[in-house]
Amino acid sequence: MSETMKAIVMHGPRDYRLQTVPKPVPGPGEILIRTGAVGLCGSDIKCYTGAALFWGEDGRPGYVEGTPIAGHEFAGVVVELGEGSAEKYGVAVGDQVIAEQILPCGTCRFCREGSYWMCEPNEIFGFKQGRAEGGMAEYAILPANAIVHLVDPRLSAVEAAYLEPLSCAIHAVDRAQIKEGDVVVVAGVGSIGLCMMQWAREFRPKMVIAIGTRPSRLELARRLGADVVLNVRADDVVQAVRDLTGGYGADVVIEATGGLDGPQQALEMVRKMGTIVAFSSIKEKVLVNWNLVGDQKELVVRGAHLGPGCYPKAIEAVAEGRIDVASLVSSQFPMEDFDAAIDAAMTADGVKVMVRPSGLDA
Ligand SMILES: [Zn+2]
Ligand SMILES: [Zn+2]
């Protein structure tokens, strides 16, 4: 009889089940971890609620393959090492580790060029049965193609799980190439925007302006170092940014609102020859005045996807207390209460909801 474990298995939209499944055994180059915490994010909600991107439509397949275990924002402690993986990763049983969310194929054009985060098949933990099972389980396999990082033992389980979205935030901010003295707007104060804002401070900007809709999150933004907070529901944010910059606009705008109006507002509030980083994932197609990019402002517009090369920076920043992610964890649930956890993630109150597969005090 093989050993078993509890896991949240994805069967379809709004059909995620707590099941007893075989406890995986690590093969060559693989690591088995005991999962400490798993974050829920916007993409988990989109998947849970049935977005076509994940489940397909009109006969086209979606991103989800089979019935995988959910969860891509997770970390844990090494409990078993497959053949060769101790040497390969420099880790031992008992170490806290995290794998980057993407499992690069290693053979496509982008992997071969070193741009593994753009890997053509783009396989992320928690969406592919058998190849990229998620972390919403007592134990999880980090496959042989995972990019594994040793996590500083000063980080708690939830801080370790937060490294995934934090790395995405760091990459997006790094793409902006902020210069000392810049005025930086972070539009969107979700679980990633609130990290972007903190990382932006590392570049010694003149001013960080946080823009959001929820007063509780804007208050958090102020507490975590935003110089100015603007509520898009109460303020004319474009005019406010112009007023704060002598009429010119911000040097850098990082667009992380996830809203339909975010991109046009970013184009309007950035100065001529300024930089916009596009991070949002927006459900519908967005309409913008494209003339602002070229003819009128000669802007730099950069995209940002995942957190390549950023995990070590994220680990160090949290360990040294330069970035506070613990304050962003608004609630934690045992795996048995997954339905309550996803409900909490879908309501407006909290910032980051975590599930604790090994128990709340593991
Ligand atoms: Zn995520
Ligand atoms: Zn690839």
Image (spheres, helix red, strand yellow):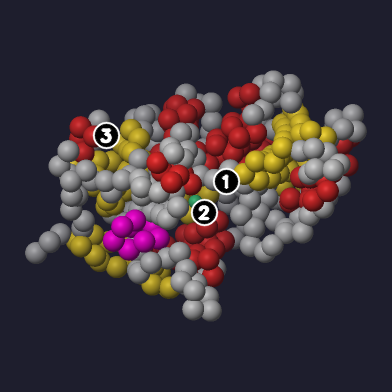
Pick the quarter of the image with the C terminus: top left
Label 1 crowd bin: few (<14), some (14–19), many (20+), radius 10 Å: many
Q: Look at the picture and state if 225 lies above or below 2.
A: above
Identify residue type, mark 1: Ser
Q: Nearer the viewer, mark 3 or mark 2?
A: 3
Q: Position of residue 250 (x, y in %)?
A: 79, 34
Give the secondary structure at mark 3: helix
Q: Is residue 172 left or right of residue 359?
A: right
Q: Position of residue 243 (x, y in %)?
A: 89, 34
Identify residue type, mark 2: Cys
Look at the magenta stretch and give its main secondary structure: loop
Residue situated in front as seen by the camera: 93 or 141: 141
Give the secondary structure at mark 1: loop
The response on whether ligand 1 sits within 8 Å of label 2 is: yes
The response on whether ligand 2 sits within 8 Å of label 3 is: no
Q: Is residue 275 magenta?
A: no
Residue located 26% across and 46% down the image: 144
The response on whether ligand 1 sits within 8 Å of label 1 is: no
Q: CA distance from mark 1 to mark 3?
A: 29 Å
Give the secondary structure at mark 2: loop
In the rendered image, which quarter is residue 224 located in? top right
Marks 2,1: beta carbons within 8 A: yes
Q: Position of residue 193 (x, y in %)?
A: 62, 42
**Residue under label 3:** 89
Residue located 65% across and 45% down the image: 278
**Residue under label 2:** 41
Pick the quarter of the image with the N terminus: bottom left
Identify residue type, mark 3: Tyr
**Residue under label 1:** 191
Q: CA distance from mark 2 to mark 1?
A: 8 Å
